[in-house]
Amino acid sequence: MFPALRAYPRLLKANWALVIEYRAELIMWFLSGTFPFIMMGVWLNIAKNRSLNGFDENAFVAYYLAVAWVRRINFIWILHDIEDRIRTGELSPYLLRPLDYSHHIFAKVIASRAYNAIVIGVVVGIIVLLVPGQQFDLRPLNLLMFVVALGCGFVFEFLAQYIAGTLAFWTTQVQRIHDMWWFLKTLLGGFLVPMALLPPQVQAVAEWLPFQISIGLPAEILIGRASPERVGFGLLVSLVWIIVMFGLSRWLWHTGLRRYGAVGA
């Protein structure tokens, strides 16, 4: 563990250089992430001059601004990196290095998400200043809860993608499996619609699933619409899922390596 921690500054520096080198590509990724603003327009039209379960026009603006920022930080896409390296044999050189492959890919993700957080943060900040009324709850305790929830969501997303990628040891249909996962996460994770607007039966199920920690819960905390009880319960459920997923990811990785038959493995 300690050798890995000592290596992270260099890993992050190298991956940050790659991010800056391909910043045009990241700008295209940013432009493609406008879906929350589309959903904002849809719900603003529906909620015109009325409130929906406590969400009025200002609340919808604040929520989807928070969603846009949280999504660009917690939207992790490493599935194809892992799948391609397993399928083509490019994973083999990493197996000879002292650090586990997960550290290399994790450092890459941190560097790219940091860049995205800065870019989208500037845009969201400008919009917040231009829109009348208070959009975010910036009290220190609330910001602390937001950072904790955001960190949990980041780890959850990384583990979910990592697990999906390692399935390439057994199948070539990794993308299809991930598509089903993505559909559930989009529907129950607060990306399409705030959890408060879901049917009560769906909310009761979604509270026990980890999807809310990706986007919905951090966004609700940032705009000040999550009670301490909801935050505590959501973080506890997420922590349990993260522990389970971490164990599963390590088991799949070590089991898959025994099946790995690429040249040089």
Image (tube, rainbow, N blue to C red):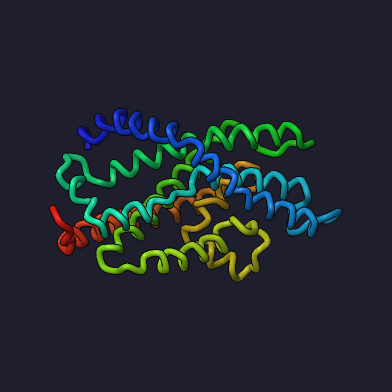
Q: Residue at 30% across / 33% down in the picture?
A: 11
Q: Residue at 69% across / 44% down in the picture?
A: 62
Q: Is residue 253 left or right of residue 25?
A: left
Front residue of 45 and 260? 260
Front residue of 65 and 235? 65
Task: Give the farthest residue toward the right.
Answer: 49
Residue 67: horizontal and vertical position, in percent?
A: 60, 47
Q: Residue at 86% across / 53% down in the picture?
A: 49
Instruction: Give residue 200's quadrant in the image.
Output: bottom right
Front residue of 211 and 115? 115
* Image quadrant in which the C terminus is located: bottom left
Instruction: Give residue 202's quadrant in the image.
Output: bottom right
Residue 222: horizontal and vertical position, in percent?
A: 61, 41
Q: Residue at 65% across / 33% down in the picture?
A: 125
* Image quadrant in which the N terminus is located: top left
**Tally of numbered discs:** 0
Front residue of 261 and 191? 261
